[in-house]
DNA sequence: ATAGCCATGTAACCAGTTACATGATTGA
DNA sequence: TCAATCATGTAACTGGTTACATGGCTAT
């Protein structure tokens, strides 16, 4: 159900083809959902059947024609309604952590290699997000204000990747050296006060 | 496919009923996967058909009988094989972030309330993880060594929840005050050196 | 009384993945 | 020549959720 809403928010932001949407999901400033083109085309079809989006065919000469989708009035309403409904955080499903849990069963080196592989993946994602962040802050205030919300989602992505990298490094080290973890010094609780409400 | 492996790792650790497994997934030191009892029972059935687990019926007088599952030799082998195969990090799917992305469309207060609600959920999860962490460090070295790997998965959970709370607080503040985000000072890149390989 | 825990499951459905399919253009 | 980008889709399948179902015991 939620992919539909993710699509609606993106189209609300700017009309586009299924292909466009797939790109936006992949790259950067829409780092909050993920979908393959196959699924996107299916959902666009459904959304259209429900009259929440509609498209115009855009003929192109040297490339395939595009169906440029845009959100309808009804789609806009549906999206606003959804914005008011609570959503729950998704359940965690990290196969890698399953592996760490059972690391004593597997080949020691294979696990270390896997941790490093993941670290490389997250590092790559982080780098690209940081680049987007740099671009964001290079813009002037008016534009920054306009892209404030997408930036906040990007920030979430940056934190996420950053945090994974730290955990992966820490875990790699502890497993590689077969060392006992130390109690965190001041790190984990934090209990940050929020500034005056 | 992966729930099967998550079940196998847990059973490898200690035999138990479907109900037991559901508890272990929910509560704490197996904070790496999530599944409902319905799904678990299905998967146990399949795993048994594949001879990767087996059960003994444990009759009880005043409560329903339990099927106590344990991993078989073949299951153990299959698990070890899986431990050597690479797994990819899951795709992110955060409906909440979709909402932040489109926060300008919705009711301002509703969004702030939603951010706070999530903060409360994550805070609660964090508290319970921190309690488990305290318990872990209260044990003596031998036991700590034995539970080292589950502890590392717990650490991942602690980081995760901690990080979410920070992002939620930061985001709540910025949206509440309609303020422009500031460039992170030294926070986000970090680029921590790993200790001598 | 009512809720919650223990303990098992089936069935219908929905969401997401993987495989398959086409076909022109551009750059290494 | 090979891979990538643009652009669309269908079909089969698998993984996961939700609803439904049962039933005794214990604690408030």
Image (cartoon, coloured by chain):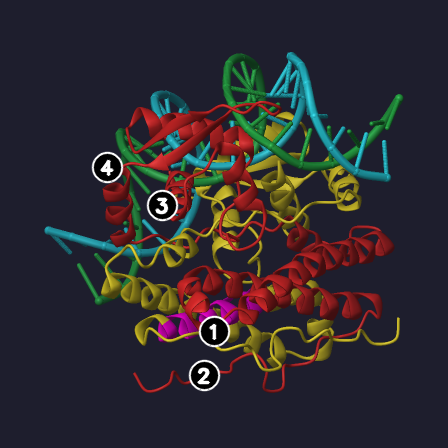
Chain colours: A yellow, B red, C green, D cyan
Above or below: residue A171 compared with residue C4: below
Q: How many other residues sit within 10 Å of disc 1, few (<14), some (14-19) or many (≥20)?
A: some
Cβ–Cβ below 8 Å for labels 3 and 2?
no
The 10 Å Cα crowd at callout 2, few under 14, some 14 to 19, many 20 or more, is few
Q: Decide if residue B40 is on the left or right side of residue A185.
A: left
- Residue for badge 4: B74
Q: Which residue is mark 2?
A: B192
Spatial CA distance of label 1 from label 3 is: 28 Å
Secondary structure found at label 2: loop
Q: Where is residue A115 shown, x and y percent of the image?
A: 35, 65
Residue at image location 88% in from the left, 71% down from the top: A197
Q: Are the two marked residues, 1 and 2, in contact with CB atoms closer than 8 angstroms?
A: yes
**Left or right: residue B100 compared with residue B173:** left
Q: In this view of the protein, can residue A147 be seen by the observer?
A: no
The part of the chain drawn in magenta is A157-174
Please rate how many residues cluster around mark 4, counting C-alpha atoms within 10 Å: few if below 14, some from 14 to 19, many from 20: few
Q: Nearer the viewer, mark 1 or mark 3?
A: 3
Question: To which residue does mark 1 refer?
Answer: A166
Marks 1 and 2 sit apart, C-alpha to C-alpha, by 8 Å
Pointers 4 and 2 within a single chain: yes
Instruction: Work out whether disc 1 and disc 2 sit on a shared chain.
Output: no
Q: Residue at x 65, y 62 (%)?
A: B126
Q: Which circle, 3 or 2, is nearer the viewer?
A: 3
Q: Is residue A81 left or right of residue D18?
A: right
Label 4 – label 3 distance at C-alpha: 12 Å
């Amino acid at each position: 159900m939620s992919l539909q809403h993710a699509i609606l928010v993106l189209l609300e932001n700017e009309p586009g083809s299924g292909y466009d949407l797939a790109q936006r999901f992949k790259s950067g400033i829409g780092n909050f959902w993920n979908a393959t083109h196959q699924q996107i085309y299916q959902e666009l079809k459904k959304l259209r059947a429900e009259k929440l989006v509609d498209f115009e065919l855009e003929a192109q000469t040297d490339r395939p024609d595009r169906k440029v989708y845009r959100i309808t009035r009804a789609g806009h309403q549906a999206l606003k309604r959804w914005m008011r409904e609570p959503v729950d955080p998704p359940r965690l499903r990290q196969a890698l952590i399953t592996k760490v849990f059972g690391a004593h069963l597997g080949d020691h080196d294979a696990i270390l290699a896997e941790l490093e592989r993941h670290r490389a993946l997250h590092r790559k994602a982080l780098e690209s997000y940081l680049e987007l962040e740099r671009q964001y802050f290079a813009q002037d205030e008016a534009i920054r204000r306009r892209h404030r919300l997408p930036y906040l989602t990007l920030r979430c992505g940056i934190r996420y990747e950053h945090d994974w990298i730290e955990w992966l490094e820490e875990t790699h080290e502890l497993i590689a050296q077969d060392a006992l973890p130390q109690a965190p010094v001041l790190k984990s609780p934090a209990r940050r006060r929020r500034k005056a409400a």
